[in-house]
Image (spheres, rainbow, N blue to C red):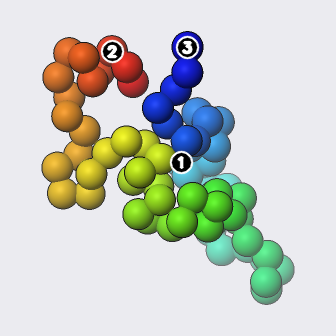
Amino acid sequence: MSSVFKLRPEELQLFFERRHIAAPDNQGEKRECLVILEKVNLNHGLLFSLATDAETGIIGDVKDIARR
């Protein structure tokens, strides 16, 4: 089954890991989740990759929940 999402679950999980919340120790180093954000074109790209909208969120009907 093909996914409508452009991010893998393990990539999305990085945003919620405690080690990715603090700034890196080395100046110029980027957290892996920031690299992912840049890869998908920051916030707009993240929303697109998750098939959601910043204002309305997910549709949330039975069909939408099933595909998620």
Q: Secondary structure at mark 1?
A: helix
Dots 3 and 2: beta carbons under 8 Å? no
Q: In this orientation, which residue lies closer to the viewer: 30 or 1?
A: 1
**From the viewer's perspective, is the residue at label 1 or at label 2 nearer?**
2
Which residue is the site of mark 2?
66
The residue carrying mark 3 is: 1
Q: Is residue 64 visible?
A: yes
Quadrant housing residue 36: bottom right
**Where 24 falls versus 61 (above or below)?**
below
**Who comes first in sequence, dot 1 or dot 2?**
1
Instruction: Name the one closer to the observer, 41 or 14.
Output: 41
Going from N to C along the chain, the mark reached first, 1 or 3, is 3
- Residue at image position (55%, 52%) is 15
Q: Quadrant of residue 33?
A: bottom right
* Left-right relation of 33 to 57: right
The residue mark sitting in front, 3 or 2, is: 3
Secondary element at tag 2: helix
Residue drawn 47% across and 47% down?
Answer: 49
The residue tagged 1 is 16
Badge 1 density bin: few <14, some 14–19, many ≥20, Cα 10 Å: few
Task: Give the amino acid type for the residue marked by disc 3 in the picture.
Answer: Met
Q: CA distance from mark 1 to mark 3?
A: 26 Å
- What whole-number distance in Å separates the C-alpha atoms at marks 3 and 2? 13 Å
